[in-house]
Image (cartoon, rainbow, N blue to C red):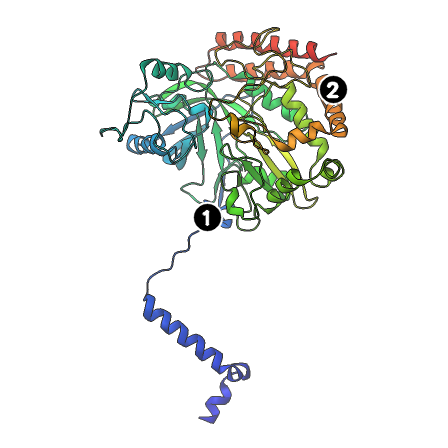
Amino acid sequence: MARLRHRIPIRLRHHWKLVAACVAFLAACYGVFGSGTVRPYVTSVRTASAGVVVRDLAGSKELFDAAAPHEVALTFRDEGYQDMLAEYFKDGDKKYVEADLTIDGTTIPSVGIRLKGNSTLQGLTWKGQTRPRTTSGRGNQPEGFRPPGGEPPEGFQAPENGRQEGARRRGGPGGELKAEEPENLPWLISFDEFVEGRRYQGHSQLAVRPAMGSAAVLNEAVAIALVGAAGEPSQRSAYASFSVNGRRSAPRLVVEYLDEGYAERLGDGVLYKSLASGSFTYQGEDQTAYADDFKQVNLVGQRDVQPVIDLVRWVEQASDEEFASGLAERLDVVSFARYAALQNILLNHDDMAGPGHNYYLWYDVGTKKFRVISWDMNLALRGDATAGPDDAIGRRRPDDRAARPGQGEQPGQQARPPAGRQQDAQRPGGARGGGHALKERFLKDAGFKKLYEREHAALTRDLLAGGTATALLDQALKAYGLNAGADRAKAAEEAVDLRTTLETRAESLAG
């Protein structure tokens, strides 16, 4: 017995009581829980392991090569699509549907697709009914919804005929969207939703933009390209012929999504997406309080949203003197001045201060500074082309043609929030109605305003007066025409209007 005792390691003999206690605890756990599996619950959709690339598909050609035609085709079961629509029309949830995807001849099975957009989907109809915007945007029974094959919910009253017809005409900014025509809807394609770790040419997601009532959405393609030409982080895009279950649409603009792969290309840092449901308002140190404000894109489980909370708190609480002296320690102020100038030059009323809060925050862990990244430029280059650097950019009616001198809203006007949301627009951080504390304080400060004016003048000279914008328009028009189903005549008409907008913009800002 003594010999056996000496074969046990000395450390184990010294701590035998602790070992015995652990064994007893495990035995008790087995007696209580049995052999059942304990399943952890997490608050994030993607875990830290989701960033690990298992397979990166090369494809047959570079997706964003504008000099080549492209083809994108989706195939999915109608049952899953109908279930997705029922859930969206009931709760506003955008559920993924499993589909097979073919890009430029490369077939990729079991991708995830879901509806993409907020204001774009406001006029979406399904079986003749619309889903008007609700107060909170989530969780409320939408007005006008009737479950398929069932009775309407208690208290349901169908919209008046005039309101139904108005929604059908509206159909999102500039056009009508019908669920029965999935080939015309805006889609988000996820390569790793059902197959973990899969990417396509480095992308885990791609956005397929809607036509927005135009043939080629040249305004968005040119605006995206101009942001990149300004030296700011932008997205790559390309036109592609597009079909869903054999139903072909006109060529669609496919846009790079700001996903984990995009964040990796930016460098060592964390990418945060601003959500349309949120605001730039300090709500305490509890990170769960910001779930409706920001979504962390990469390094989930390794980093968190605390840097954003610190920035929001500081912007809200800093005195004017502290803001002027300390902002450069927290924000790339030159890049931000360029961002603000670009939004004005490109007539984009729906930027970080717009109703959709369309922007991303990039946090560089080395410099510990933020950078604001442009996103969702579908409403750019559609406002008053004579607006000046200090004028608020208003929203023109969606059915107006491209802005000419005197068209659209007058300089200085800002689109008013819808009734019932004007109070939200006055919140310090900017809520659903628009406004953003960071941008407003930046432009209010005399020193940062001079920086903004310097960058505005330089970008006007380089992008507009130098002919860069019109050259990018020519490239976009040519790229669109390469694809099957292109309406070249209508696209050429749109190009004439957009060229007029760009030329008027250059002349108006030259002084």
Dots 1, 2 in contact, CB < 8 A: no
Up the image or down, 158 lies above or below 400; here it is below
SS at mark 2?
A: helix
200 horizontally vs 327: left or right? left
Q: Earlier in the sequence, mark 1 or mark 2?
A: 1
Residue 507 place in picture, x, y as percent: 69, 9
159 horizontally vs 509: left or right? left
Residue 146 place in picture, x, y as percent: 28, 27
Q: Find disc 1 in the rendering and name its residue.
A: 43
Mark 1, other Cα within 10 Å: few <14 / some 14–19 / many ≥20? few
Q: What amino acid is found at the position of numbered circle 1 in the picture?
A: Thr
Up the image or down, 497 lies above or below 202; here it is above
SS at mark 1?
A: loop
Q: CA distance from mark 1 to mark 2?
A: 45 Å
Name the residue located 65 percent from the left edge and 16 percent from the top edge. Answer: 469
Residue 135 vs residue 481, the one in the foreground: 135
Label at residue 457: 2
Dividing the image into 4 quarters, which one contains the C terminus?
Answer: top right
Residue 97 vs residue 70, the one in the foreground: 97
Label at residue 362: none
Q: What amino acid is found at the position of numbered circle 2 in the picture?
A: Ala
Residue 356 vs residue 427, the one in the foreground: 427
